Structures are given as C-alpha cells and as structure tokens.
Image (tube, rainbow, N blue to C red):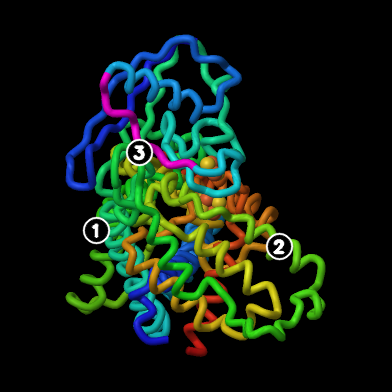
Amino acid sequence: MSGILNSSIGRKFAMALSALFLMFFLLQHFSINLLSVTSPETFNEVSYFMGNNPLVQYGLQPVLLIGVLFHFIMGFVLEIKNRKARQISYAKNNGGANSTWMSRNMIWSGAAILLFMIFHFNDFWVPEIVEKYVEGKSQVGKDFYAHVVHMFENPIRVGVYVLAFVFLALHLLHGFDSAFQSVGANNKYTKGLKRFSKIYAIGIPVGFIIIALVHHFNH
Amino acid sequence: MNLTLKIWRQKNANDKGKMVDYKISDVSPDMSFLEMLDVLNEQLINEGDEPVAFDHDCREGICGMCSLYINGEAHGPDRGVTTCQLHMRMFKDGDTIFIEPFRAKAFPVIKDLVVDRGAFDRIQHAGGFISVNTSGNTIDANAIPVEKADADKAFEAATCIGCGACVASCKNSSAMLFVGAKVSQFALLPQGKVEATDRVLNMVKQMDEEGFGNCTNTGACEVECPKGISLENIARMNREYLTASLKG
Ligand code: SF4
Ligand code: FES
C-alpha cells in the first residue's frame, strides 16, 4: 500500500476518488441552491444548518477543502508529468480523430473552474468565514436568501457564473465516466453509465445557470 | 497519384532532425503505404540521397514492427490496421502527407522514422510471463478448464502486437493500453493467477520507470489500436493493481 501516489495507477485512482467525492458534493450543492428558487425559508434553514452544524463545519468542510485542493494540485502535477513524457511534439496531430475535445483539454476546463472557484469563494465563502469566525457574529435568523439574490443583481457576475458552468459541463462530460474507468469499473453497466454521465454533466451545470438567471431576472 | 510527402529526417539519435519535403509521382492506389515508401527510397537512392529509414518486418499486420504517425494518426487514417496494411487508396491525388516517428520520451528516435520500443520489452521482462517448468513433463495448457468467456477475453488481450500505436496516439504518451492488455491476458486465466500480484506491480513499476505518461482516459489508444484492444483491459489492470497493492 505504501507510496501508492508514486505510481501512475495510484495517482489515477486518487484523482478519480477526489473527483467522485467532488461530483457528489456538487449534487448536494445543487440541491440546496434549488431550494433558493422553490422555498426561500427552507433555503435559509438549510444554509444556517450547513454553516453552523459542527459536523459539517469541522468535519465535512475540511475534507471538502482538502479534496478540492488535492484535485487541483494533482491535476497540474499530472499535466506537467504528461507533457514531459513527449518532448518533441508532432508536426501534425489529428487528436479529433480519436478523442473528444473535452478529454484532451481537462487542464484548461479545470483551470477555468479554478479561477471561478477563487471568485466564488470570495463572493460567498470568505465573507461567511469572516462573519462567523473573525467578527464572531451569530447567524441566527440571517437572511441567506437575500444575500444570494443581491449577489446575482450584477449582470457581470451572472455572466461569469454562466461561463464557469459551461466549463464545468465540459469538464464533467469527460470527467464523470472517466472517474469510473479509473477505479476499474468498466463492465456491463458502462454504457448506461455513459448515458447517465451526459445527463449529469449537462443537467447539473445548466441547473446552476438557470438558478442564477432566475435570481437575476426576479429581483 | 502525385503526392507531397513531409517526412521526419534525423541522422541518428543525437541529431536534432527536421521535416523534409519530397515529391512522389505515379503512386498506385493499390500500393501499401510501405510500398509507396519503398518506391520513394528507390528514387532517393537513384538520386544519390540517403533512403528514409523505417521499421517493418512481416508486412501483414502481425509483427507490430511498422509504426509511423501519418497525417496526425498512428498507422494513418484507416481503422484497425497497421501501417503495412494501410493502402494508398485512403489518400487522394495531390495530397500532402505528414510522416513522423511515434513520439514519446520512452520511445527515442534511432534514425529517421525508426524508434526504440525496447521499453515494451523491459515491461514484458518485468512480469509479462508465467513461470512454467519446461523440463519435459510440461502439462498441456488445455488440461486446465477455462470458462469460454474468460478464454475469449484473454485471447483478445493477447492479440496485442506491441506496436506502440497506443503510446504514440495518447496525448500523455501513456502505455496503459499495452500494459493493460499484457496484464489481462494472464489475469483472466488460471495459469496467470499464481503470479498475478507480482506481475501487475512489477509491470506497472517498470512502465512508470520507462517514463511513459499518466493515463487520463481520453480513449485515443483504443481508437487507434490496430488490434482493437479495449479500454476494459486498462480498467482490469487498475483493479488488479489496486488489489495487488493492498496485498503486497
Ligand atoms: S494495445 Fe494496440 S496499439 Fe497498443 S501496442 Fe498493443 S496492439 Fe499496439
Ligand atoms: S510490418 Fe509487421 S505489422 Fe506491419
């Protein structure tokens, strides 16, 4: 078991596990966002719970942060290693003949998502952390919903969010079923999984986009 | 057909190398790609130039010696064939064809289009075999019953000819399809189970040491493989490797 990250398959496995975890988190994030459209009160309750439950705050949140960091760092490390594995590039390379654009450009869709995450953390996560742990304010009765609606008033911000989710969709279109292949799951369910992966990869980002647009045009 | 060829010329392993343009005329669409190169070489020899070095042996798609990255694809634009089985009818009169060696740090160029694929041999030596006593009382392999489905899958994996097209096509220069096939051909058979743990650990270790890149599941290898080796074999290797790491 020792030094599993030193092997190519070990790294691949770790990359896939962090991806599966992040995709699960994304679904959970989406479900909560959906509440902001269907029921602002429930959205406020759930937001309060997520922001103040010790298990979420001190248990899940650090795991999530580590997962995100690991996935990004490992993604860049692998890209550098892989570039080194071919020192002279082809004069003519027809990548489109044998693989999808998404699969060949995970580093770029990933980098775009990283930039977005910095922007997004600055919008929501950092102010929350400052409020709770630096200023020590209580969040009891806080109107999280009003904050979300306020954030989506700015059309530039909405534009950035929409664009980021397009990149996320491109990333997931390759990443979702790729993660299953990496952990060794390629069997009779793979065809069905591929179909489901398309629904997830397009459906979830489009859902996020619709929610942002709804808040933008409804305020 | 009249064609323009853009061919990688490199005197030896240390030479920098460059693409050189050649014109060739009266190419028959029935020629194989290698026959077309034979004609070019005759032309070059007659003109007093150095012929283009390229690998080949069986010229019938079974040895895996021929290579070449043709117009941006390993073994050219056709599917399920090696370069020796590629025909000039896949091209049109007036075409410009790029001909380059398989590129990967682990496959250094020896001369022109010839690369050293010894890394594959070293991976095989690390575990791509079963230890059988051959002192004269060897037991017939057929004496051990094997389920048909497994036998078929093992056979499919064993059809890998070690050509290296998977590495050449992969944006990461990963050798996982080759190693996956070589691990799978034994992993599926009772004879292979005995040394399964060491086999996969040692072969993957050697693969990494040779400097091949990390697989990101683009699937380019499977599309370009002349033998249709499936990505299932990589998934199987991943499973074998993870189980072996936990054990060993
Ligand atoms: S897996 Fe296919 S492409 Fe790779 S070495 Fe074997 S036959 Fe060639
Ligand atoms: S020369 Fe043997 S496979 Fe092409």
User: Which residue corresponds to mark 3?
Assistant: B113
Tag shown at residue B153 = 2
The answer to whether dots 1 and 3 both sit on one chain is no
Which quadrant holds residue B174?
A: bottom left
Query: Is A199 left, or right, of A89 in this rendering?
Result: right
Q: CA distance from mark 1 to mark 3?
A: 53 Å
User: Which residue corresponds to mark 1?
Assistant: A122
Q: Chain of mark 1?
A: A
Residue A205 x/y as whole percent: 48, 48
Residue B182, above or below B74: below
Q: Chain of mark 2?
A: B
Q: Is residue B224 visible?
A: no
Part of the protein shown in magenta: B48-56
**Crowdedness near tag 1: few (<14), some (14–19) or many (≥20) residues, C-alpha within 10 Å:** few
- Residue at 23% across / 43% down in the picture? B12
Is most of the magenta stretch helix, strand or loop?
loop
